[in-house]
Amino acid sequence: MARVRIDLPEKLGFTTQIQITIKDVNYGGHVGNDSILSLIHEARIRFLASLGYQELDKEKGLGLIMADAAVVYKGEGFHGDIFDIAVGTGDISSFGFDIYYRITTTRENKTIVISEAKSGMIYFDYNERKVGRLPEAWKQKLTL
């Protein structure tokens, strides 16, 4: 069986913490796969805010739209865990970029990798319903 592989950049320069709540846990007693996508969405919002951006500028109708997502699960997360989510970018182009995530938690003084993920983000004109050009200011901040 072929497995998804994510090649994380060496530098994931932004980090945030999110505590796992009961809504994140599935019937298997661990963090659900759907919750991982929600958690990386929250991390993405925080990352963009740290750069002074939002996913959507409602006044201009410009923002980001997710083109793809990949998640590799490496360990289990549980209710009450505090996830450390490291975020970085790569593959910046004229129209978008990739955001990479590494989710870890610490238990019994050990760092446990929960998952690695990537989301492909495209700059999008929501008024025209079409792909737009990624502004130079975004490119410069995303490469820091």
Image: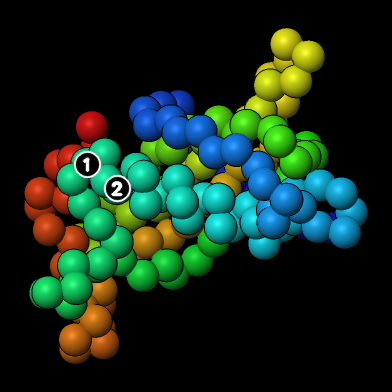
Residue at numbered disc 2: 48
Q: Does residue 74 appear anywhere in the picture?
A: no
Q: Position of residue 90 (x, y in %)?
A: 36, 44
C-alpha span from label 1 to label 2: 5 Å
Q: Are marks 1 and 2 in contact (CB under 8 Å)?
A: yes
Give left or right: position of 83 versus 132. Answer: right
Amino acid bearing label 1: Leu
Q: Position of residue 77 (x, y in %)?
A: 75, 39
Residue 68, placed above or below residue 47? below
Q: Nearer the viewer, residue 30 or 118?
A: 30
Residue at numbered disc 1: 51
Looking at the rendered structure, the secondary structure element under dot 2 is helix
Amino acid bearing label 2: Leu
Q: Residues within 10 Å of mark 1 (few under 14, many from 20)?
A: few
Looking at the rendered structure, the secondary structure element under dot 1 is loop
Give the quarter of the image for residue 75.
top right
Q: Position of residue 5 (x, y in %)?
A: 65, 47
